[in-house]
């Protein structure tokens, strides 16, 4: 028997591959399924099941393509109602895979169909628990997502179900069982996840706040406290996972069409596509196509795209570093953005060499910001980090408008003022600047290196540090 965690940092997501005696299982696969197929071929194994712990909200699963390409059976837990062929398992049902067995444990709470899969080895010993979004390392799944899809649910009802699932199904299991969750730190599916991606159940019983002895009422209060609104694309991803979607092969074929500058410009004007520039932030600042938006591929690309592009059906044209076009189309598809229709052949350099119009964003190092503040102490410093980051430690006198909610708060930024914009390291501030630049804001200046560089310089007054866990 072999168990492999396949972790994707961009989404903070863990998929799993289990192989035993020529048969294999994949749990919660990503949209691009070829790596799983190749892994099974290398092992001389047939993928028998694709196990889905629930209808995911933060990414589009690869269950349909993987089943289509391998003949595997898609398995959901009790109460799931997929609109495609799948096996809806019963609570306690045993799935046989080679010489090992997988027990279905229905654990509603994150969603009503949420299910954990308990792996038993060749001797029948319970060895691993694949918990999906029911139990994370250091946290549990947020119980407010399914209510966006099922009208009669409330987050309080879901939290109550989650309590019962944890205390009646998971806590009684043996301490030496290894917990394999669907997500780690950085995912919006929980609020307090550890950077660790596995642990023993026994250690989680000792350290996870949600597994400590408490009443159901206290548990509900604890789990719901501090939840931030989920990204807007989450409900759309749930529906795609329930109803089905276009094959990733078709999405890639459509999205990787090379367009020369003339074709690119004509297509953009004809269909009002979003121009998405995925280059490095500082490279973007030095020259870009007017009205394009920068979300760098070398960062939390897919979650930010999902957070900031309001319409999941938005047509998208790419400006990218050469050779990375297929990767970008795939990562957009992971969160349901399937309408990429091509990329600029030759990238921005080809656009510039064709004599097309370009734009820039001023970006300055911290020492230049300090120099300007010495001349004018009342400069407008705009912090686009999350609210919790800002109040934990910030430049004295700065304003805070979190990038996450810029579409709701753009009116708070005055076109008549000059703003010096920073985030933590420079990735988010350029996204922010590019969005507002495309909407006619000409007076935004980027601060290179963000708050990290500001603090390291020691030249600007910074508030006393407050640990985020001590704040409401």
Image (spheres, grey):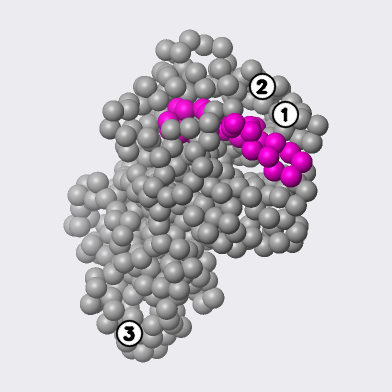
The span from disc 1 to disc 3 (Cα, nearest Å) is 59 Å
Q: Which badge, 1 or 2, comes first in the chain's sequence?
A: 1
Residue drawn at (69%, 43%) of the image: 97
The span from disc 1 to disc 2 (Cα, nearest Å) is 9 Å
Q: Depth-wise, is mark 1 or mark 3 nearer the camera?
A: 1
Image position, residue 389 (x, y; %): 44, 39
Image position, residue 89 (x, y; %): 53, 35
Q: Which badge, 1 or 3, comes first in the chain's sequence?
A: 1
Q: Is residue 136 visible?
A: no
Q: Which residues are magenta?
A: 93-118
The span from disc 3 to disc 2 (Cα, nearest Å) is 60 Å
The residue labelled by disc 2 is 173
Q: Quadrant of the C terminus?
A: top left
Tell me the tag on residue 263: 3
Position above or below: 154 against 213 = below
Mark 1: give few (<14), some (14-19) or many (20+) Cα within 10 Å.
some
Position above or below: 333 against 229 = below
The residue labelled by disc 1 is 126
Question: Element at badge 3?
Answer: helix
Q: Depth-wise, is mark 3 or mark 2 nearer the camera?
A: 2
Tell me the tag on residue 171: none
Question: Element at badge 2?
Answer: loop
Mark 1 touches mark 2? (CB < 8 Å): yes
Furthest toward the right, the residue is 123
Residue drawn at (64%, 17%) of the image: 172
Residue drawn at (63%, 57%) of the image: 36
Q: Is residue 472 left or right of residue 267?
A: right
């Amino acid at each position: 028997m072999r168990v492999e965690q396949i972790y994707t940092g961009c989404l903070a997501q863990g998929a799993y591959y289990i192989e035993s005696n020529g048969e294999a299982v994949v749990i919660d696969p990503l949209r691009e399924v070829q790596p799983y197929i190749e892994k099974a071929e290398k092992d001389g194994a047939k993928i028998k099941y694709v196990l889905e712990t629930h209808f995911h909200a933060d990414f589009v699963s690869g269950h349909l393509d993987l089943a289509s390409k391998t003949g595997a059976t898609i398995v959901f837990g009790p109460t799931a109602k997929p609109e495609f062929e799948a096996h809806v398992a019963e609570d306690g049902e045993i799935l046989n895979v080679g010489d090992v067995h997988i027990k279905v444990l229905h654990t509603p709470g994150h969603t009503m169909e949420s299910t954990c899969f308990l792996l038993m080895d060749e001797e029948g010993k319970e060895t691993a628990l694949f918990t999906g979004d029911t139990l994370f390392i250091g946290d549990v799944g947020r119980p407010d997502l399914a209510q966006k899809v099922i009208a009669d649910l409330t987050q309080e009802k879901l939290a109550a179900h989650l309590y019962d699932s944890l205390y009646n199904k998971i806590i009684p299991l043996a301490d030496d069982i290894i917990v394999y969750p669907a997500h780690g730190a950085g995912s919006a599916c929980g609020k307090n996840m550890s950077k660790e991606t596995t642990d023993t159940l026994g250690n989680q019983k000792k350290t996870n706040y949600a597994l400590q002895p408490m009443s159901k009422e206290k548990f509900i209060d604890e789990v719901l406290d501090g939840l931030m609104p989920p990204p807007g694309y989450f409900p759309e991803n749930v529906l795609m996972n329930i109803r089905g979607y276009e094959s990733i092969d078709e999405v890639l074929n459509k999205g990787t069409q090379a367009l020369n500058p003339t074709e690119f410009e004509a297509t953009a004007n004809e269909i009002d596509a979003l121009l998405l520039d995925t280059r490095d932030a500082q490279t973007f600042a030095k020259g870009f196509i007017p009205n394009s938006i920068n979300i760098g591929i070398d960062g939390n690309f897919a979650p930010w795209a999902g957070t900031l592009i309001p319409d999941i059906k938005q047509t998208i044209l790419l400006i990218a570093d050469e050779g990375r076009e297929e990767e970008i189309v795939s990562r957009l598809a992971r969160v349901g953005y399937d309408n990429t229709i091509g990329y600029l052949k030759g990238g921005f350099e080809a656009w510039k060499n064709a004599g097309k119009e370009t734009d820039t964003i001023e970006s300055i190092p911290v020492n230049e910001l300090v120099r300007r503040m010495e001349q004018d102490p009342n400069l407008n410093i705009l912090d686009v980090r999350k609210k919790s980051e800002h109040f934990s430690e910030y430049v004295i006198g700065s304003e805070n408008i979190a990038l996450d909610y810029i579409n709701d708060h753009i009116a708070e930024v005055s076109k008549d003022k000059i703003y010096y914009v920073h985030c933590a390291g420079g990735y988010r501030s350029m996204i922010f600047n590019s969005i507002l630049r495309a909407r006619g804001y000409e007076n935004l200046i980027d601060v290179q290196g963000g708050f990290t560089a500001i603090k390291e310089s020691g030249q600007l007054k910074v508030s006393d540090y407050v640990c985020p866990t001590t704040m409401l």
